[in-house]
């Protein structure tokens, strides 16, 4: 039994490496990372709701702890997913929304108030591959 516990960790990386799927829609110079950069004076939170073209603020409460938040001058790079790229996520002219919120405002309100009134929503930005390519896969909030 001790031998198995010793040998098993040696084979796990080999097994994972041989079963990893690489997205066939990702070109050789694909972008796995998409950076959100906060150049505004406000602390922000953001989310991708993946409901394009619907402009309704989604149910996911971005004011909850554990969601992405950025102070002025900070940035965060979000991956497209294991083995994937943004070129595949936004393939064939697909578009999505990035919702950008004033963190202080939405943290002081009930999420249903934010959803129904739009209070705290700074911007709803449409992204597609053309936009991301033109901006070097950086979404800048000013």
Image (spheres, grey):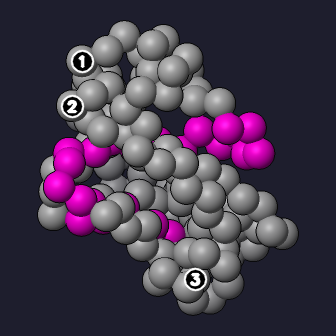
Q: Is residue 77 left or right of residue 55?
A: left
Residue toward you, 26 or 124: 124
The reply to whether residue 56 is visible in this rendering is yes
From the viewer's perspective, tell me whether residue 127 is left or right of residue 74: right
Q: Which residues are magenta?
A: 32-55
Choose between 122 and 53: the one closer to the eye.
122
What's the distance in space between the residues labelled 1 and 2, CA to CA? 6 Å
| Label 1 residue SS | loop
Check whether the beta carbons of the residues at disc 1 and disc 2 lie within 8 A of each other: yes
Per the image, is 51 magenta?
Answer: yes
Mark 2 and mark 3 in contact? Answer it, CB < 8 Å: no
Quarter of the image where one finds residue 55: top right
Q: How far across and how far down the image is residue 25, in percent?
A: 75, 73
Neighbourhood count class around disc 1 (C-alpha, 10 Å): few under 14, some 14–19, many 20 upward: few
Number of the label disc, if any, that sits on residue 35? none
Report, in whole angstroms, how far the alpha carbon at label 2 lies from the one at label 3: 31 Å
The residue pinned by badge 2 equals: 104
Label 2: how many residues lie within 10 Å, few (<14), some (14-19) or many (20+)?
A: some
Which quadrant: the C terminus?
Answer: bottom left
Q: Which residue is mark 3?
A: 133
Say above or below: 15 vs 31. above
Callouts 3 and 1 close, C-beta under 8 Å: no
At numbered mark 3, what does the secondary structure look like: helix, strand or loop? helix
């Amino acid at each position: 039994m001790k031998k198995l516990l010793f040998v098993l960790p040696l084979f796990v990386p080999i097994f994972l490496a041989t079963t990893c799927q690489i997205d066939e829609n990702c070109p050789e110079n694909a972008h796995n990372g998409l950076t959100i950069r906060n150049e505004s004076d406000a602390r922000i939170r953001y989310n991708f709701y993946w409901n394009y073209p619907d402009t309704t603020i989604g149910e996911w409460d971005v004011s909850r702890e554990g969601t992405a938040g950025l102070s002025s001058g900070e940035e965060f790079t979000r991956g497209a997913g294991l083995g994937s790229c943004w070129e595949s996520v936004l393939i064939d002219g697909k578009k999505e929304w990035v919702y950008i919120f004033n963190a202080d405002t939405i943290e002081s309100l009930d999420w249903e108030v934010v959803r129904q009134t739009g209070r705290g929503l700074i911007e709803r930005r449409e992204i597609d591959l053309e936009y991301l390519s033109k901006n070097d896969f950086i979404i800048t909030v000013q």
